[in-house]
Image: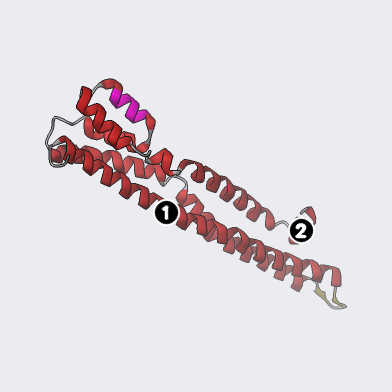
Amino acid sequence: MFTIVEAAGWPIWFLIVASVVAVALIAERMMFLREKNIVPAGLLDETVKELKQSGVTPQMLKKLSEGSPLGRVLAAGLRNVKSSPNIMKEAIEEAGRTTTHEMERFLTTLGTVASISPLLGLFGTVVGMIEIFGAQNAGGANPAELAHGISVALYNTAFGLIVAAPSMIFYRHFRAKVDSLTFEMEQQAIKLVEIVHGERR
């Protein structure tokens, strides 16, 4: 590995930093955006059951708020349970926007890494080309310098693509995951409003 880094020259360090950032963000988002963490199965049914048994209590709201993002959305609606359906929906929408923002955290950074990695690879390629032309002199090309310049150019191009491709794949995956989870939360929140106001059983 060190031999490759040495052959690729100093521009490769920018790509190494980008790859470390990408791996860290991908691991963190994979842990956070698990469906059971965001939209726990059966939470709406448990909430409705508890609501019918004992009404809205501070303990219930606290448990929901601290449990999951969906719980926070439901809790926001239940805090306005005595208001009109529109007021309840507005409170849910506000909590939903906050929750969506939390789910989208770091995705912009991951997308940026995916976008700039090929450019960093291109930068390394340009540095390699400069070294290749710098190896030319009146007595001809220095083979060692020429080989080093070619290594810098090719390794940086390849590594830039290696970093960019998985970063973009996971960025797109997480964006789709956030959209799916947001939609699921919206559906469950609407069900809660309809149940509370007698529009659904």
- Looking at the rendered structure, the kind of residue marked 2 is Ile
Q: Residues within 10 Å of mark 2 (few under 14, many from 20)?
A: few
Q: Magenta span covers which residues? A: 60-66
- Looking at the rendered structure, the kind of residue marked 1 is Arg
Q: Is residue 64 magenta?
A: yes
Residue ID at (75%, 73%): 133
Q: Is residue 144 left or right of residue 183?
A: right
Figure check: 58 above or below 172: above
Rendered image quadrant of residue 100: top left
> Which mark lies nearer to you, 2 or 1?
1
Nearer-N-terminus badge (2/1): 2
Q: Residues within 10 Å of mark 1 (few under 14, many from 20)?
A: some
- Name the residue that disc number 2 marks: 4
Majority SS type along the magenta span:
helix
Task: Name the element at disc 1.
Answer: helix
Residue ID at (88%, 78%): 139
Q: Is residue 178 left or right of residue 199?
A: right
Q: How is the image coloured?
A: secondary structure
